[in-house]
Amino acid sequence: MGGEGGAAIGPLHEAARIAEALLFAGGEPMSASALAERMPPGTDVAAVLMGLKRTYAGRGVELVEAGGAWRFQSAKDLARLFAETRAAPRRLPKAAMETLAVIAYHQPVTRAEIEDIRGVSLSRGSLDLLLEIGWVRPRGRRRSPGKPLTFGTTEGFLSHFGLVSLDALPGKDDLKAAGLIDPRVEAAFDVPRPDGAPAADEDPLEAGDAAFYVDYAGGEEE
């Protein structure tokens, strides 16, 4: 028998309804694997998500993937409707944007390495600001004298810039056009492709490391 109005409801349609409900009601992005755990056995979750993405294309809300997780969000061209109710985004100083670019492309990277790549000293404020926004995090310690902290980007960074993963980071020309890198550091800025995995010379953070840095950023000797 069909559903209301005689329309047949097949397994794929039912799975799409389940995914739609989970993503709307959950309020938090969900990975494909997390969705699969709530779906009927054997569901092709990738096909379900792609179908939903096509269904919502051009509507007031759209289904997007960022950082390996899926979520519904308002269509980008309608962002103007919320401009009056949202706080104006903080404009990052150029030094902070350059620092963010270096961390994104060279992670895991230490404070001293950031300074070496940029060719100038790293102010405490630049790193503090990126930590406060939630785009950067302490991620480990370099296996070198002093065991300096290493830094990397966060899921919040990927989500804000609409990146599915670090592989989707733009190239050098795009960064120059956006004003994210200074011509002074171009020679050293070779735009590597980080994969987010722990580096061979990096140890995981110990209890309290991240909290210590957030409280006393800029005070660590490397």
Image (tube, rainbow, N blue to C red):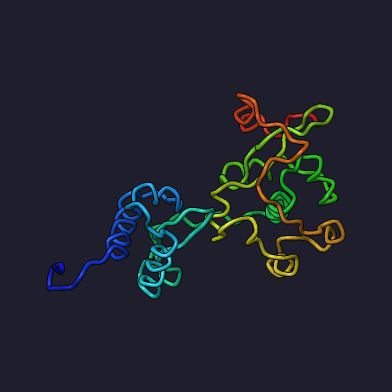
In this picture, residue 116 sits left or right of residue 42: right
Query: Which residue is at the front of the view, 184 or 63?
Result: 63
- Is 129 placed above or below 8 here? above
- Is 124 placed above or below 74 here? above
Residue at the outermost bottom position: 58
In this picture, residue 128 sits left or right of residue 173: left
In this picture, residue 186 sits left or right of residue 101: right
Query: Residue 181: where, in percent of width, then height?
Result: 75, 60
Query: Residue 63: where, in percent of width, then height?
Result: 41, 64
Query: Which residue is at the front of the view, 205 or 41?
Result: 41
Residue at position x 41%, y 58% in the image: 45
Q: Quadrant of the N terminus?
A: bottom left
Query: Which residue is at the front of the view, 36 or 62?
Result: 36
Residue at the outermost top position: 207
Q: Quadrant of the C terminus?
A: top right
Residue at position x 81%, y 27% in the image: 146
Residue at position x 72%, y 65% in the image: 171
Query: Residue 59: where, in percent of width, then height?
Result: 36, 73
Q: Residue 172 occupies which quadrant of the picture?
A: bottom right
Residue at position x 65%, y 37% in the image: 138
Query: Residue 7: where, in percent of width, then height?
Result: 18, 73
Query: Which residue is at the front of the view, 53 or 216?
Result: 53
